[in-house]
Amino acid sequence: QILVEVASLEQQQQPKKSQHNDTASTSKETADHSSLSDEFLKKKSRVILRNLSFYAKENHIRSVLEKKFGKVVDVHLPRVQSNLHVGFCFVTFANPEDAQRAVEGNGVEIQKRAVSIAWSV
């Protein structure tokens, strides 16, 4: 009789645990979906600029691209040990349409140097 009562108590507690796990997994799935959509947007809005002057700074790049194409969210300039960047950078625009216009556009000059813009891989 004691075993039957213990078994019934265990069965009553199991659904409560699974209900709690369901809400936790739902919020986790929502967070995962949000990060996936952010990652997707970033991939569709990110371009690479090549042939940059070694003396071009982030503010130069940002100001030129925002004037011509639209809001820039991020500029990433990879650097070498001497703290000079390596002649290219990655730019993330606020929306994919601005990135599309940047890739299709031509004649962009930064620090008196023509740069090429292509989709980032």
Image (cartoon, rainbow, N blue to C red):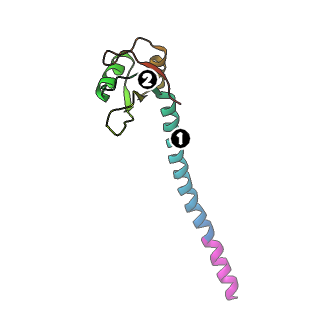
Question: Where does the N terminus fall, quadrant-wise?
Answer: bottom right
Residue on which the image places disc 1: 36
User: Is residue 35 left or right of 74 when viewed as pictured?
Assistant: right
> Circle 1 — which element?
helix
Main SS, magenta region, reads: helix
Which residue is located at x 34 percent, y 40 percent?
81
Residue 87 in the image, given as x and y percentages of width and height? 39, 27
Instruction: Determine the image quadrant of residue 94.
Output: top left
Horizontal and vertical percent position of residue 55: 30, 26
Q: Looking at the picture, how far across and down is residue 68, in whole percent?
A: 37, 16
Q: Is residue 68 above or below residue 10?
A: above
Q: Nearer the viewer, residue 64 or 85?
A: 85
Q: Amino acid at mark 1?
A: Leu
Q: Residue at x 48, y 25 (%)?
A: 96
Which contiguous range is marked in magenta? Answer: 1-13
What's the amino acid at mark 2? Arg
Is residue 94 highlighted in magenta? no
Q: Residue 50: which numbered mark, if any?
A: 2
